[in-house]
Image (tube, rainbow, N blue to C red):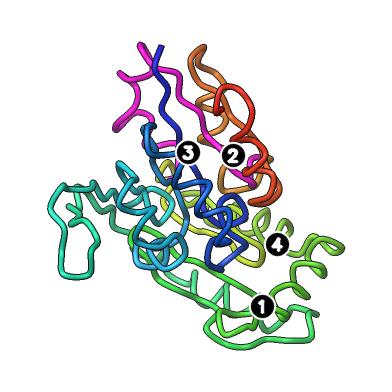
């Protein structure tokens, strides 16, 4: 039975919002040469390119970006930069409900966290990304907020409250400092019915992610795959765990 491999990016292949480690990039590129690999990330397609680099992207079969609300499929044609051309096969739409932005801004204002850097909201295809510390935060500021959140569970409390108020939406913890917001059902698990339901009959499908426990943004896809006899999920805490995972069966 053949295998298909699905990878999250932040916290799985790279440090959060950072580029892939060069040594790991070399090892991962060598590993994926003979395998069918897809990326399933909350980040945008452009950011995924920046994080993983052109050599790895040229070996990936497809990229499900923005919580799988867009799907890009690689073509054989190479452009002037040395990167393969890509086709956008679908893109979901997200229309923010009335007062959602006001609610999010209120959480920023009310948060007891001491540093707020701005750009707290980012619109992506099919979703919103929200952060208390803000997207202008440095790596050190992001790390500080991640520690604060681990102690105070701020994001979990916000997710719970917003989910009760906006029942037509889903709110999940993504990356180290943010919350992903999208229409109910438009999470990473949508790719199973869209593209991999038939493949599951004859292939083993493996998903690797760092946010598998609820309310993480890898939870639903892990849940759907784990319910199928040919689906398996692998939880990691960082890219170093993924590097070690690649040395074990069924990856080795």
In the image, 28 versus 189, the foreground residue is: 28
Task: Tell me where the magenta segment starts and ends, as one range.
Answer: 187-212
Please tell me which residue is depicted at 34% across the width and 54% down the height of the picture: 57
Decide: is 92 above or below 30.
Answer: below
Marks 3 and 2, how far apart at CA: 26 Å
Is 252 on the left or on the right of 186, as rendered?
right
Real-space Cα distance between discs 4 and 1?
19 Å
Q: Give the CA separation, mark 2 to mark 1.
A: 25 Å
Q: Which residue is mark 2?
A: 219
**How many other residues sit within 10 Å of disc 1, few (<14), some (14-19) or many (≥20)?**
few
Q: Name which of mark 4 and mark 1 comes first in the sequence.
A: 1
- Quarter of the image that includes the C terminus: top right
Mark 4 vs 2, N-terminal side? 4
In magenta segment, residue 58: no
On whether residue 202 falls in the magenta region, the answer is: yes
Which structural element holds mark 4? helix
Residue ID for mark 1:
139
Verify CB contact (< 8 Å) between mark 3 and mark 4: no
> How far is disc 1 from disc 3 in space, using C-alphas?
29 Å
Q: Is residue 212 left or right of residue 122?
A: right
Q: Secondary structure at mark 3?
A: helix
Q: Quadrant of residue 46?
A: bottom left
- Direction from residue 117 to residue 229 in the image, left or right: left
Q: Which residue is mark 3?
A: 31
The x, y position of residue 110, in whole percent, is 73, 80
Q: Residue at x 74, y 78 (%)?
A: 111
How much space separates mark 3 and mark 4, taking CA atoms?
Answer: 35 Å
Residue 21, which numbered label?
A: none
Mark 4–mark 2 CB contact (< 8 Å): no
């Amino acid at each position: 039975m053949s295998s298909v491999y699905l990878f999250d990016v932040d916290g799985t292949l790279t440090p959060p919002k950072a580029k892939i480690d060069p040594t790991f990039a070399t090892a991962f590129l060598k590993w994926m040469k003979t395998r069918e690999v897809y990326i399933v990330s909350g980040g945008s397609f452009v950011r995924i390119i920046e994080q993983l680099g052109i050599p790895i992207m040229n070996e990936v079969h497809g990229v499900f970006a923005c919580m799988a609300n867009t799907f890009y499929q690689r073509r054989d044609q190479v452009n002037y930069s040395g990167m393969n051309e890509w086709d956008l096969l679908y893109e979901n739409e997200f229309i923010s409900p009335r007062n959602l932005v006001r609610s999010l801004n209120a959480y920023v204002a009310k948060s007891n966290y001491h540093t707020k850097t701005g750009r707290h909201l980012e619109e992506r295809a099919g979703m919103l990304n929200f952060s208390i510390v803000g997207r202008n935060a440095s790596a050190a500021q992001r790390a500080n907020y991640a520690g604060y959140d681990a102690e105070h569970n701020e994001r979990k409390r916000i997710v719970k409250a917003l989910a009760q108020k906006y029942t037509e939406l889903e709110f999940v913890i993504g990356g180290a400092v943010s919350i992903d917001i999208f229409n109910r059902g438009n999470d990473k698990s949508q790719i199973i019915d869209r593209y991999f339901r038939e493949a599951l009959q004859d292939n083993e499908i493996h998903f690797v992610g760092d946010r598998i426990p609820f309310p993480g943004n890898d939870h639903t896809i892990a849940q759907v795959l784990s319910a199928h006899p040919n689906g398996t999920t692998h939880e990691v805490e960082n890219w170093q765990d993924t590097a070690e995972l690649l040395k074990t069966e069924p990856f080795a």
